[in-house]
Amino acid sequence: MRTPSFARRRGASITWAAVIAAVIALLPLFVTDVYTQNILVLTLMFAALSQSWNILSGYCGQISLGHALYFGLGAYVSTILFTKFGIIPWIGMVAGGALSASIALALGYPCFRLRGHYFTIATVVIAETGYLLFLNWDWVGAALGIQIPIRRDSWLLFQFPRDKIPYFYFALALACATWLVTWIFEDSKWGYCWRAVKDNPEAAESLGVVVFHSKMAAAAVSALFTSIAGSFYAQFVGYIDPESVMAFQFSLLMALPAVLGGIGTLWGPALGALILIPLNELVRSYLGGSGAGIDLIIYGLLIIMISLARPEGLVSLFTRRKLPALTG
Amino acid sequence: MTTPSLLEVRHMSRWFGGLVANDDVSMSVAQGEIVGLIGPNGAGKSTLFNVIAGSLPSSKGTVVFDGGDVTALPAAARCALGIARTFQVVRSFESMSVIDNVIVGALVRTRSTHDARRNAHEVLAFANLDHRADAAANELTPSEKRRLEVARALATGPKLLLLDEVMTGLTPVEARTGVDLVRRIRDTGVTVLMVEHVMEIVLPLVDRVIVLDLGCVLAQGTPADIARDPKVISAYLGERRRDASA
C-alpha cells in the first residue's frame, strides 16, 4: 500500500504552507517602507487571484482570459453597496462573490459547450463586453469611476487610509484561503474530476464524470474567490473605474503567475506571483509613464523562456527532485 | 436460454447524414458471458460499441441494460449504472499518475477519495500494474497503457465491460497476458463484450461471437459455428485467409 506516502506528501505540503505563511506574517516587523508594503500586498493578492484562476484554468483546463470580469464585479458590487446604500464592504464582498459565482454559472451554461481556444475567445469577448458596459453606465460612475468616501481607520468599514498593514494581513489570509481551498480540492472528488476533464473529456465521461457539471463547479469556485479579491482591491485603493479593475490586463495578470509557476499545480500561482508582481512594480516605477508596455514585453519574454525551458512551470524544478519515480 | 440478458439492443439504427453505419441491429449479451463482436473494417462495430456505451446517440431503436431503458442516458449516467468501456485509441489522463487515473474511475462509486484510492490499488494489483502506481501515465509502455485503461474501467465497478480492440498492437506474449486478464475479469462476475480484430485471440476466448457486416448482424453463434459459417467466411474470414496466404 502506498497510501501512507501519499498522505505524507499532502501533510508535507500543508506544513510548508503553514511555515511560509508564518514567515510572511512576520514581514511587517521588518518592512516599514510603504512602497515595499504596497508591493507585498499586491503580490499576495495576485497569488490569491492566480490561485483562483488556476482552479478553473489550471486544474479543470478551461483557459479563461476573462477573469477581470469577476474581479471588476467584486470591486463594483462592494463599492456600490457601500456608497449608495451604506452597506458595509464585508457584506458587499459576500454579495459580490455570490453574484460573480452566479454569473460564472450563467455564462458557463452556453460557453462550456465550446472547447479549447473557442472557449478562451468567448471569455475574452464577454469580459470586454462587461468592461464596455461599466464604462458607459452612468449610475455606477461610467468612465469617471467611484471614489470610496474615507471615514476613519476601521475594520468594520474595512478602510485604513493611513495604514497598509491591515490590508497586508487580509491579503495574506486570502492567499492562504485560496491555497487551502485548492489543497482540499486536490484530494476531493471534484479535484480528480477536474483533472480528468482537462486531460481527456471523453474518457472522463466514460468513467462517470459529468464533464459539464465539473466545469460549472470549477467556474463558480474560481469566480467566487476572484470576486472577493476584487472587493478587497477596491477597499485597498479606495477608488475604482473600469480601467483600473476590469481591463483585459487584469485577466492576463491573473493567468501569468500560474503559467510561470506551473499551471494546474498547488504552488505554481504563488511562486509565479512572487516573481512576477514585484518585477512588474519595479519596472513600472523605474520606467514611469514612458514604461507603459515594457512590463508586457518582459512578461512575454518570461513566458517564451518558460515554455521553451520548463513548460511545466517553475515548480517542476522542485518536484523533479522530490519525486524521482516520476522521471522513471 | 435461462440466463436473463444483461444488455439488449433492439432494432437499433444509426446513420451519419446519408451514411448508414448500423441498420436495424438487434443483439443481446447474457449475464456472465464473454461475447466477441467482429466484422471487417467499416462493418459498424465501433458505432454499435459507442451507442451501447452512450458516447453516440442512436438514430432509431432502443438499448436496454439490466432491465432498464438507457437509450436516452449519456455515457456518464450509463457508467453509474454499470457499463464501463475502454477506447480503441488509448485515452489515459496523461498528466496524472497511474493511480490517479484509476481513482477517477473508482470515484463513481464513492465520494471518499480514501476509499477510492484503496479500491484503485486493488484493481491495479488485479491488472498486474500496481508496481507502476506512482508512475506518470504518459511513461507507460503501450501494453501497460492498455492495462491501465482496463483497470480504470474496472474501478468503476461495472456489470458490463466493453473492450474496444484491447489486444491490437500487442506482442504475442502481451496478448496472452491480456487474454488471461479478460478471463479473470469474467471470473469476478463481470460480463464482457469485446470488439476485436485478431481472430486467433477472439475465437478461443469468447463464449459467443456476433458478426457485423455492412452495418447489419450477419451471424451469431459459438466460435466453432462462426468459423464454419460460409457467409462469415466470405464476408470476413475468407478475405483474411486469402490475405494471409498471399
Image: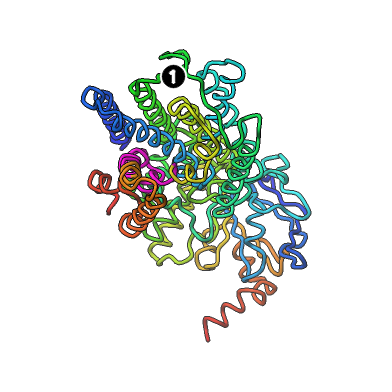
Q: Is residue B33 visible?
A: yes
Q: Residue beneath label 1, please?
A: A159
Give the total of numbered labels: 1
**Main SS class of the magenta portion in the image:** helix
Which colour scheme appears in the figure?
rainbow
Pinpoint the chain carrying mark 1: A
Q: Nearer the viewer, residue A49 or B194?
A: A49
> Could you tell whether B75 is left or right of A263 in the image?
right
Q: Is residue B153 visible?
A: no
Most extreme residue toward the bottom is B246
Residue B73 image point, x, y percent: 69, 43
> Could you tell whether A216 is left or right of B101 in the image?
right
Residue B212 image point, x, y percent: 67, 65
Does A264 appear in magenta? yes
Residue at the location (40% across, 27% down)?
A174
In the rendered view, tell whether residue B88 sits above or below residue B236: above
- Label 1 SS: loop
Residue B226 image point, x, y percent: 64, 67
Most extreme residue toward the left is A30
Does A304 appear in magenta? no
Instruction: Answer with the quarter of the image where residue B49 lies.
Output: bottom right
Task: Locate the N terminus of chain A by quadrant.
Answer: top left
> Could you tell whether B52 is left or right of A267 in the image?
right
| Mark 1 residue type | Gln
Which residues lie in the magenta part?
Answer: A254-279
